[in-house]
Image: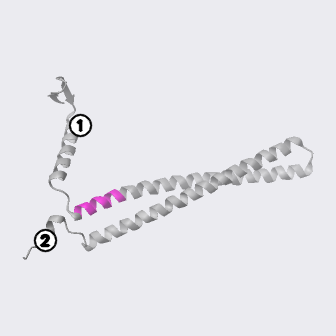
């Protein structure tokens, strides 16, 4: 445990050593970034790391989205099968009021499932397009990193008015 006196409140505060070290490390890194900004190479590497994490997150979201779509698709197939059975039953007894009401209910439910499926498929397509754009951007950044065609920092650029 690390203890110190808070000058604002006058109270003594404590913090676990790992928490204190994490706080100290994050503050030190922030100060270091302000005093010594990253080189373009480091900036590009950090952007690639960020994009990698974002791509993993988007891919897992797409996978979950696809699972939801498949569940609704399976439910829709089941309901359509039930509707076929109900239709066959109605052909044997066309005046069955319960069967007519059940058929109408099944048809409305199927319509709702089909609409929901269309919405999810549209959302999946949009998310997939966004993922592909991010992958393309990541590939371009990776190519720049590997080819070393990085922009120069401002302090590395020469002054065009300087004669030497």
Which labelled disc corresponds to residue 159? 2
Q: Position of residue 142 (x, y in %)?
A: 32, 68
The image quadrant that residue 55 belongs to is: bottom left
Q: Is residue 16 above or below residue 115?
A: above
Bounds of the magenta span? 41-51
Q: Is residue 98 above or below residue 72?
A: above
- Please tell me how crowded label 1 is: few (under 14), some (14-19), or many (20+) other residues with Cα within 10 Å: few
Q: Residue at x 67, y 51 (%)?
A: 113
* Picture colour scheme: one colour
Q: Position of residue 134 (x, y in %)?
A: 41, 63
Q: Residue at x 12, y 73 (%)?
A: 161
Q: Nearer the viewer, residue 142 or 159?
A: 159
Distance of label 1 from label 2 (alpha carbons): 46 Å
Tags 1 and 2 in contact by the CB under 8 Å rule? no
Farthest residue toward the bottom?
A: 163
The N terminus: image quadrant: top left
* 40 within the magenta span: no
* Side of 65 where 84 appears, left or right: right
Q: Residue at x 91, y 50 (%)?
A: 92
Instruction: Name the chief secondary structure element in magenta.
Output: helix
- Helix, strand or loop status at disc 1: helix
Q: Position of residue 100 (x, y in %)?
A: 85, 45
């Amino acid at each position: 445990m690390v203890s110190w006196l808070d000058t604002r409140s006058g109270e003594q505060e404590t913090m676990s050593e790992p928490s204190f070290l994490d706080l100290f490390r994050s503050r030190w890194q922030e100060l270091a970034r302000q005093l010594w900004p990253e080189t373009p190479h480091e900036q590009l590497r950090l952007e690639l790391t960020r994009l990698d994490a974002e791509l993993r997150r988007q891919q897992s979201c797409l996978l979950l989205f696809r699972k939801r779509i498949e569940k609704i698709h399976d439910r829709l197939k089941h309901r359509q099968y039930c509707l076929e059975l109900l239709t066959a039953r109605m052909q044997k007894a066309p005046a069955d009021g319960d069967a007519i009401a059940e058929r109408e209910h099944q048809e409305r439910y199927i319509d709702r499932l089909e609409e929901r499926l269309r919405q999810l498929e549209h959302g999946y397509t949009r998310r997939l397009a966004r993922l592909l754009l991010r992958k393309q951007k990541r590939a371009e950044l990776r190519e720049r990193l590997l080819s070393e065609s990085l922009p120069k920092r401002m302090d590395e650029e020469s002054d065009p008015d300087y004669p030497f």
